[in-house]
Image (spheres, rainbow, N blue to C red):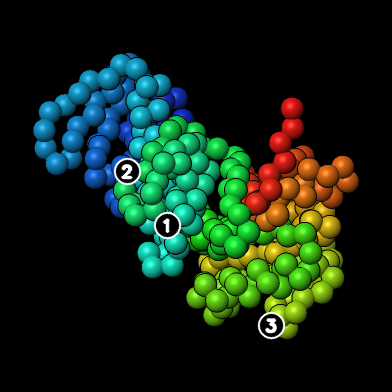
Amino acid sequence: MRAAGLLPGLLALWCASPAAALWVPRHHPLRSRLALRSTCDHTVISNEHGGGRLAVDDHSALIRDLLASTTRARVVEAVARIPADAPRPHQRAAVTAAVSHLLGGGGGAGHDGREDAAVDVTEGAGARATVVLPPGAGKTLVGLWALEAMSPTGTSLVVLPTIPLIDQTLEAYKTSSRSIASGHTSTLVVASDCADGSVKCTTDADDIAAFLRAAADGDGPSLILSTYKSLERVAEAQRLVGASIDVAVFDEAHVMSGRSRESGLGLDDAHIALPRRLFLTATPKRFG
């Protein structure tokens, strides 16, 4: 289990204990900054590199600061995974803004694409983000770089309206991602057909469940590409195995404004559990 994922639980245990120590792994981003000792009414923070000591009586404020620091480190680490030589400036700005929001709860919108430092992050993660770019501006690769930045070892989902778009997207992903092209990223297409014979194609929920189970047990990243029509099979498979999907990219997301059940299926956690959703479109629908 990742150290960053353990931190909220560690903090909860630390605050619940009348006299406990908070352990931070040696290579965790917090380790180089703070050492902590706690009692039920008093916390001492000391700088490991030397310097003064600060007594803090408000545990809740300290926890907010710690979580914000961890969130910032997670966002900066994710943004650093964006290929330095691939995205055009507007693509880098879009990926940086989306990743910063989805992992950190805000910021990144003012990025000019030339710097990866000083990502603006606020406490808490935003569950949804939308990137609006005109046709031909490279939305497909924005989605690829965003999911690889946010989920380098987990399971990602990409949803598209048609099978030809799945074929085009998979070809573009293989051209721009060594991990996908080499097969290091396990890939599954959930649709009735697929042009790429090297990738398994299915609409059977049991097959998808087996893929999700293998992805959860493996060490490398996994990718599912599905049509909107077949997304219900992915949701069914997820319920069968209780597997997590780290991030979902919905391409041509304006189709989700339709009245059919399949159009809005990906919007509702009651149907498919997705902690982070990235919507890509050139023609956003606005109501009200």
Residue 67 can be seen in this image: no
Identity of the residue drawn at 58% across and 52% down: 133
What is the number of the mark on residue 118? 2
Please, which residue is most extreme toward the bottom here?
197
Q: Are marks 1 and 3 in contact (CB under 8 Å)?
A: no
What is the number of the mark on residue 167? none
Up the image or down, 151 lies above or below 267; here it is: below
User: Which x, y percent locates residue 139?
Assistant: 59, 58
Number of numbered markers = 3
Q: CA distance from mark 1 to mark 3?
A: 33 Å
Residue 16: image quadrant is: top left
Up the image or down, 21 lies above or below 208; here it is: above
What is the number of the mark on residue 198? 3
Q: Are marks 1 and 2 in contact (CB under 8 Å)?
A: no
User: Which x, y percent locates residue 123?
Assistant: 45, 32
**In the image shown, does 269 or 213 lie closer to the viewer?**
269
For numbered disc 3, what is the local secondary structure?
A: loop
Kind of residue at badge 1: Pro
- Is 5 placed left or right of 254 in the picture? left
Identity of the residue drawn at 37% across and 64% down: 84
Assign the C terminus to one quadrant of the image: top right
- Is 95 placed left or right of 23 in the picture? right
Question: Label 1: how many residues lie within 10 Å, few (<14), some (14-19) or many (20+)?
Answer: few
Q: Earlier in the sequence, mark 1 or mark 3?
A: 1
For numbered disc 2, what is the local secondary structure?
A: loop
Q: Which residue, given by chain and number where applicable, does mark 1 sit on?
A: 89
**In the image shown, does 236 or 143 lie closer to the viewer?**
143
Identity of the residue drawn at 84% across and 66% down: 204
Q: CA distance from mark 1 to mark 2?
A: 17 Å
**In the image shown, does 254 or 193 lie closer to the viewer?**
254
Residue 240: image quadrant is: bottom right
